[in-house]
Image (tube, rainbow, N blue to C red):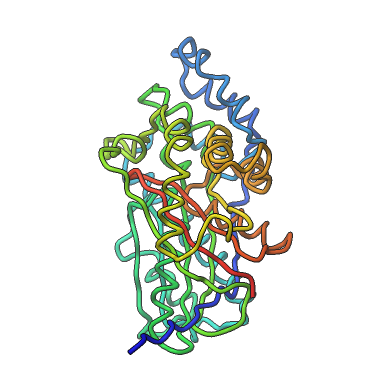
Amino acid sequence: MSQPSPAPVSLLSVATAVPPIVLPQDEAKALARGLFGDRAGLFDKLAPVFDNAGIAKRHIVRAPGWYRGDHGWKARNDVYLEAAEALYVEAAERALALAGVEAGEVDGLVTVSTTGIATPSLEARVAGRMGFRSDVERVPLFGLGCAGGVSGLATAARLAAGAPGKTILFVTVELCSTSIRLDKLSKANIVATALFGDGAAAAVVRQGEGGLATIEGGGEILWPDTLGIMGWDVEDPGLGVVFDRAIPPFVEENMASGVAQILARIGLERADIDRFTCHPGGAKVIAALETSLALGEGALDHERAVLRDYGNMSAPTVLFVLDRVIAAGLPKRTLLLALGPGFTSTGLSLART
């Protein structure tokens, strides 16, 4: 006996939110030079990364003066909790309004964040303000890093598939700027200071027809022996970024085969994809994606625009790109792609309705 086809899950909305403080890249470079003080000689060797990052500005949760302070774990996490809760509410309310869904209609909540610790998790902390039901299903996810935007949306879609009309709210909040460290002058730390910004994104998905697109399915690749490529070191006085200089060449060498595996799992071929919608990890990563996927130079235009205007916000960033793709007119089928610690790539196919 043949198995029934799975019920469709629809993407109803995508929304974004950023903190109000804007830091232009030239000011970020000057701030970083001042932050590292008497170690400026070493900083000068690494400073060109600010000029070559493809970033014009980013949003941050505290005024520049805060980053000159000596902050430990508690102080950093207190900032994370306050700002993350506010951004969660802002992004979630926008996504619900765009979807025409009341908070009380939401059956499940998926929350992705890796730049701070919240126990109870963020969605529980804002439940009263949001008006979520007491029986809402909660799935907080930690440790996904930049891949969390796609992995979290895929998780929300799987939850929604469980019952007719089941509605899931997905929110991802990352405050990368709270991890800026003055005690450790390293190439990874300088690159992070040049790249990272803060932001949040949200999406509403529901089992059933309609909406912006049908979520067709996804897949994930975890490459062996790659733990040191990307992640956080848990240290005093806070999280320490792990960035391997080999990320762009690794992407260029491996993404085409990784995408082929993801598409095979969904039952699609490369020719079925009209556009790749990618997490813009940095200018060199975008170029490596274009090369590996044979897209042609400049094909990932929305990715570069998001990187220019917001920097790398980790998990939310790919949804900022998707928001722009939606505004420009969704193609017939797009594959969301993101890379993250593990080292991993995750993909999710959206078909325009």
User: In terms of depth relative to the viewer, which is nearer, 110 or 276?
Assistant: 276
Image: 336 above or below 44: below
Q: Is residue 61 visible?
A: no
Instruction: Return the residue found at the far front.
Output: 1
Where does the N terminus fall, quadrant-wise? bottom left
User: In terms of depth relative to the viewer, which is nearer, 278 or 254?
Assistant: 254
Instruction: Return the residue found at the far right.
Output: 328
**Residue at 43% of width from left, 51% of height from top?**
147
Q: Position of residue 341 (x, y in %)?
A: 35, 44
Quarter location, residue 224: top left
Residue 292 placement, left or right of 143 = right
User: In terms of depth relative to the viewer, which is nearer, 80 or 260?
Assistant: 260
Instruction: Return the residue found at the far top.
Output: 41
Q: Position of residue 348 (x, y in %)?
A: 48, 61
Q: Position of residue 349 (x, y in %)?
A: 52, 64
**Residue at 48% of width from left, 73% of height from top?**
169
Image: 342 above or below 12: above
User: For the image shown, how many numbered marks are present on the structure?
Assistant: 0
Quarter location, residue 311: top right
**Residue at 53% of width from left, 48% of height from top?**
279
Where does the C terminus fall, quadrant-wise? bottom right
Q: Is residue 201 visible?
A: yes
Q: Position of residue 9 (x, y in %)?
A: 50, 78
User: In terms of depth relative to the viewer, which is nearer, 106 or 156?
Assistant: 156
